[in-house]
Amino acid sequence: MSPNPPRDRPPRPPRKAPPGAESQPEKALAITVVRGDETFSFRDRLPLLPLRDVVVFPHMTLPLLVGRRPSVRAIERAAARDRMLFVTAQKSSEVADPSHDELYRIGTVVRVLQLFRLPDGTLRVLVEGLCRCRVERFQWSSDCYMVKVALLDEPRVSGAEVEAQMRHVLALFNDYVHLNRRIPDEVLLTAGNITDPGILAHTAAAHLLVKVPQRQRLLESENARARLKVLAETLAAELEIVKLERKIEGQVRSQVNKNQKEFYLNEQLKAIRKELGHQSEFANEIEELAASIKRSRMPRDVMAKANKELDRLAKMSFMSPEATVVRNYLDWLVALPWRRVTRDRQDLREVERILDEDHYGLRRVKDRIVEYLSVLKLTGHHKGPILCFLGPPGVGKTSLGKSIARALGRRFVRVALGGVRDEAEIRGHRRTYIGSMPGRIVQSMRRAGSKNPVFLLDEIDKLGADFRGDPASALLEVLDPEQNHTFNDHYLEVDFDLSQVMFICTANTLYGVPPALQDRMETIRLPGYLETEKMQIGKRFLVPKQVEAAGLLPGDLKVSEPALRAMVNRYTREAGVRNLEREIAKLARKVARRKASDRLKRPVSVTPRNLHRLLGPVRFLDSVIERTSRVGVANGLAWTETGGEVLTIEVTILPGKGELQLTGKLGDVMRESGQAALSYARSRAQQLGLDKWFYRDIDVHVHIPEGASPKDGPSAGITMAVALVSALTGVPTRPDVAMTGEITLRGTVLPIGGLIEKAVAARRAGLKTIVIPAANAKDLEEIPDDVRADLEFVRIETMDQVLGVALERPAVMPSPAPPPPPDESQPAHYTH
């Protein structure tokens, strides 16, 4: 019995011979094959029939369904001649029109026994495998492939070893057929009567249910002995797989029978208890759930939903899977704080004291919390604010949320949103899914146990989105005061009131946060800490904390203020205080090591003198060149996610052909700023005292150090222009001046962002003057008072004003008087 015939889709026929195929016919030679009492003769040039997912073996009869046009033409040509074909398998069944490189070289010469043409144009062919052949050359003949083949010798093998191999293969094949229901038992009778080892190997291989590469390996074996060896290995491997399949099938059938038996017995037990008048097996649980629903003080519509589900549960079987789902759903409804609230602390002075106790500075955030409590105290009800703390890492955004909860006397819950990509994380999964649960919002409300906690959504700018939805869009309802009183979780399917929750979000940057989500939050920027603030934080909070964490007594470690200042300036350079805390922890561990080994005789006092022995060499030093006048170098200000930074932009003039080279791992926007700066210098060549063709014989190289760090943005435009003008004119720049602003081709200075962080970075670097766009004057009020007191802010509108401040002496000559207006009575002259 033959396997089901595979069917090929009719593809577009090839129009020309593929590379490597010959198109010129050669003289055909005759090949003779003797098989038992029969003799077959055929020419060495035969039509080619490529097969998908089929390998034809000698002595095998197989029906084929052929639909591809070249394949149909090949069969028709064979039928018109001697009914001989060469068949071989494709390496990939997905290729509709294979080339010669996508076909196996070793195949089988077959004889067409029967041929039927179906109504749709396809052919049903019954073929018989005769012998193995190798393709010597592919030839394309107008409408189909022709191949030149060479007969593969099949030497006769015999002996005791071959007889043992045959018996071993027959035993394995017998087990394989008995375990595999898709192979008829009649095949065993046929195989048992075969005495020739080659025919036995081909017959067994033809009935193996394996993939094409494994079948092709059997076909390509050199002789019967090698083929029997490969066949035995394949049969052994397949037997293990088939036995495992039968074992798994038996386990599944046993489990199904067990479940059916349990269901039948449970139904009988229910009927017996009903006749005896006994209550349901989980009546006590139903009563407990009903009492919990009454105690939970749910809204009327939610209680109606809960009672409806409770009625469904009472009618279900105790062992029903649906009963577990309903029971879990009712447990969630009962556990939520529908009306439980905590009382806020009414003493505003106490609130301020607690906030000041936990965090130094951050006056704007603390004022906003006190204002919220003031309104709540006067009105008795107020919707919870939705705040977003925006600032670099390490400035205390997350810890500030805990401090606010402690000051208000509320519960605190935190949800980390970094890397969340599934919308169901926010809204929950529907109950149709196995193991479904509510979203993180509802889970956190249950954990809080009150209706008005302080809810921290940490790292909201790290949310992702993929095929499972957009979590940022799901947060739109949560963070909207006009909508979150009816927040609907997919699992609960009822409304839950979030209007009294105080939501606090944290982010390092608003880049990537959808505008609609930004609009729902009140953004409060937390700039980087100043030197004095870091010293106070280290003295009041970090040193006592690390001393306690290291198991030391308060008097074992004393850090002086000069030592703290040295740690802030020379061992850390950051917007927050995390690295400062690590350095203090390093000091505490060294003292703890001495104390643990009984070598601590007296308290350790840390001063600037012994700091390098405890913490190692200084990590940050102020470069000498930054404090001296220099030509072609200017100080710029940049904003990063970790705070502000001071960039030193260098420009060098070299002999060349007028090319501009920008290095330092710059982005496209910063590169365009450099080109705009050069265009400005060329347009102002006369006012700068330069030849108007000065750029023809020079190359300009602009470099920003720290080339491993990527840099981008337009705010370095005026800094590049100042450094470029300084290099061209030879006028040095002032080392105590930094600048930021976008430049246009006309020399206009446009506003920029991140002025607070940039001002803090300039003060930290010891700069005295900052040149800013006049349009950024409105941002000066947000800069801390002590920063503004130490810096001079120069507001400018044009590049000429920038050069007047940034260069040590004027480099801009007065603009020439405008030419007189043209005489309208004279004809106009145009130069092209």
Image (tube, rainbow, N blue to C red):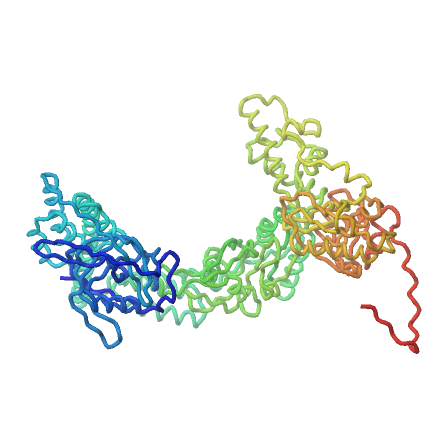
Q: Quadrant of the N terminus?
A: bottom left
Q: Quadrant of the C terminus?
A: bottom right
Residues 527 and 340: in front is 527
The picture places residue 456, in percent across and down from the top left corner, at 55, 55
At 17% from the left edge and 67% from the top edge, which residue is drawn? 271
Residue 655 lies, with reference to residue 456, above or below; the image says above
Residues 61 and 173: in front is 61
Q: Quadrant of residue 251?
A: bottom left
Residues 726 and 430: in front is 726
Residue 741 lies, with reference to residue 309, above or below; the image says above
The picture places residue 426, in percent across and down from the top left corner, at 48, 61
- Asked whether the viewer can see residue 215, the reply is no
The picture places residue 817, in percent across and down from the top left corner, at 92, 63
- Asked whether the viewer can see residue 448, the reply is yes
How many labels were placed on the picture?
0
At 15% from the left edge and 54% from the top edge, which residue is drawn? 33
Residue 707 lies, with reference to residue 287, above or below; the image says above
Image side of residue 455 versus residue 336, left or right = right
The picture places residue 485, in percent across and down from the top left corner, at 52, 68
At 69% from the left edge and 40% from the top edge, which residue is drawn? 535
Image side of residue 371 versus residue 29, left or right = right
Q: Quadrant of residue 365?
A: bottom right
Image side of residue 534 versus residue 770, left or right = left
